[in-house]
Amino acid sequence: MSNAKWLKLFNQLKKEELFFSVAQIKFLISESAISFRFDRFDIDSFDENGFGDFGSGPFDYKEIEWISIPGKPEFERKNRDEILNSRIISQPIGEIEKVMELLGRFEYDTDEFELKIYGYK
């Protein structure tokens, strides 16, 4: 996917405040995915080429193979040795899909559990 298309998507998600705090991003040069989030703290750190500071360093959009956003990630919780109820959060994958449909042609897969956006498929 082109830099312009990624930028168009991220700008629209920012405008509509469709943030997600749990996702996986896979780069072309990497064998495994790493954690990624797009939230209020990160939204000002991208421009027409990519993200300037992203935990593991800057990256260009052209390096993205895919981004996977789970709909309801679950977090296990403990208090010392006591296992607490898991915390489940909802992420706006349906709304993100609608934004992509309005903006143009995006390559993606979706089901009730995940939205996977492809840079390369």
Image (cartoon, rainbow, N blue to C red):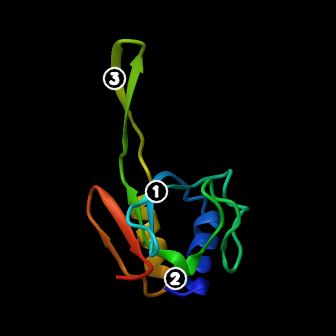
Q: Depth check: give the residue in front, 66 or 34.
A: 34
Tell me the SS state at disc 1: strand
Residue 83 image offset from top left, x and y in percent? 33, 17
Tell me the SS state at disc 2: helix
* Residue type, mark 2 in image: Leu
Residue 103 marker: 2
- Badge 2 vs badge 3, beta-carbon distance below 8 Å: no
Q: Earlier in the sequence, mark 1 or mark 3?
A: 1
Query: Residue at left 62%, top 78%?
Result: 7
Residue 53 image offset from top left, x and y in percent? 69, 60
Compute the Cα span from label 2 to label 3.
Answer: 39 Å
- Residue 65 vertical placement versus 35 (above, below): below
Query: Residue at left 37%, top 54%?
Result: 70
* Residue type, mark 1 in image: Ile
Q: Depth check: give the residue in front, 82 or 7.
A: 82
Query: Residue at left 42%, top 41%?
Result: 89
Where on the picture, by quarter, is residue 48? bottom right
For label 3, the residue is: 85
Q: Earlier in the sequence, mark 2 or mark 3?
A: 3
- Badge 1 vs badge 3, beta-carbon distance below 8 Å: no
In the rendered image, the residue lying farthest to the top is 81
- Residue 104 vertical placement versus 11 (above, below): below
Residue 74 image offset from top left, x and y in percent? 35, 39
Query: Residue at left 48%, top 87%?
Result: 104
Residue 34 marker: 1
Q: Nearer the viewer, mark 1 or mark 2?
A: 1
